[in-house]
Image (cartoon, rainbow, N blue to C red):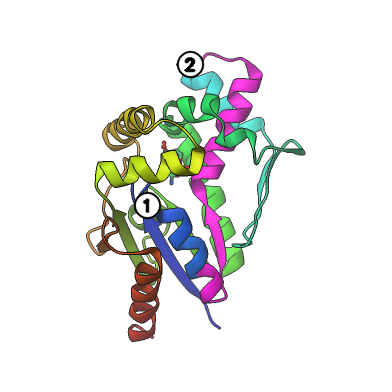
């Protein structure tokens, strides 16, 4: 299997992670969760105690943290300075702070460069995030933008996290707003992306469609 880069963007709860992992496993590719990288940096920022609104200090913590992430679709691990943070980065503290940290241009520059290296190394990889098609991998072989209704997204997330649907809906709306309106690389659809609405489509159907698109494109 040769080089192949698939970019999967979309808001939280659109099915990105499940679709991207299954697609990667199905086409024998690596998988990169760029959201986990922003979450890991956020964990380091919270641990350091610096003020989240102090962009310069946030950027400094990001630059000094030794962040590592695996690319195995069946189970990748994230460490910061040798500490495994897989569980912590999904917690409410990190989730509440991540969009602020991800809005800092120097943090994005650092992580985008790291992501490009990981993509280069892997060669064959499915990459999920918010800005992959437009910014990180503009030459991707396939760009996908997943959407779903706000209700469907909140329902999926609250089922995953065992949290209240209304609270999850409010948190998703808040993060979507921050992610779409920030100045540096906002969540956006690449002009050449295939848009799929997962509200009605099942995960397997979405993965099948993406696989046929890849086959068609050779
Ligand atoms: O996908 P996930 O919910 O884990 O992403 C967490 C946060 O990281 C997003 O809400 C967004 O603020 C940020 N992010 C980003 N660019 C990416 C991936 C994630 O800004 N490529």
Q: Residue at x 30, y 58 (%)?
A: 198
What is the distance, in whole Å, between disc 2 and disc 1 at their CAs? 25 Å
Query: Which segment is the magenta one?
Result: 24-53
Seen in the picture, residue 138 relative to 61 is either above or below; the reply is below
Image mark for residue 195: none
In this picture, is 173 found above or below 111? above
Binning the other alpha carbons within 10 Å of mark 2 as few (below 14), some (14 to 19) or many (20 upward) gives few
Query: Residue 182 versus residue 28: which sits nearer the camera?
Result: 28
What kind of element bears circle 2?
Answer: loop
Dot 2 corresponds to which residue? 54
> Would residue 10 be seen by someone viewing this image from the given angle?
yes
Q: Counting other residues with Cα less than 10 Å from the Cα at mark 1, is it few (<14), some (14-19), or many (20 or more)?
A: some
Read off the residue under disc 1: 135
- Residue 49 location (% of width, % of height): 62, 15
Specify whether residue 212 is painted magenta: no
Callout 1: SS: helix
Residue 11 position, x and y percent, is: 34, 45
């Amino acid at each position: 299997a040769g080089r192949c880069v698939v970019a999967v963007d979309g808001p939280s709860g659109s099915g990105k992670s499940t679709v991207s992992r299954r697609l990667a496993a199905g086409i024998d590719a690596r998988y990169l969760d760029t959201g986990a990288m922003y979450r890991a940096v956020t964990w380091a920022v919270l641990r350091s105690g610096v003020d989240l609104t102090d962009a310069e200090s946030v950027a400094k913590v990001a630059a000094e943290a030794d962040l590592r992430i695996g690319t195995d679709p069946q189970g990748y691990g994230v460490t910061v300075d040798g500490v495994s943070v897989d569980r912590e980065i999904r917690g409410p503290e990190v989730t509440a702070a991540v969009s602020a940290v991800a809005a800092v241009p120097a943090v994005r520059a650092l992580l985008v460069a790291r992501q490009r290296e990981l993509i280069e190394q892997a060669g064959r990889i499915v990459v999920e995030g918010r800005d992959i098609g437009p910014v990180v991998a503009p030459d991707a072989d396939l760009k996908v933008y997943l959407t779903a209704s706000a209700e469907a997204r909140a329902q999926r997330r609250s089922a995953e996290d065992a949290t209240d649907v209304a609270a999850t809906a409010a948190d998703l709306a808040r993060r979507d707003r921050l992610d779409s309106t920030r100045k540096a690389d906002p969540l956006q659809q690449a002009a050449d992306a295939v848009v799929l609405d997962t509200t009605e489509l099942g995960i397997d159907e979405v993965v099948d469609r993406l696989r046929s698109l890849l086959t068609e494109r050779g």
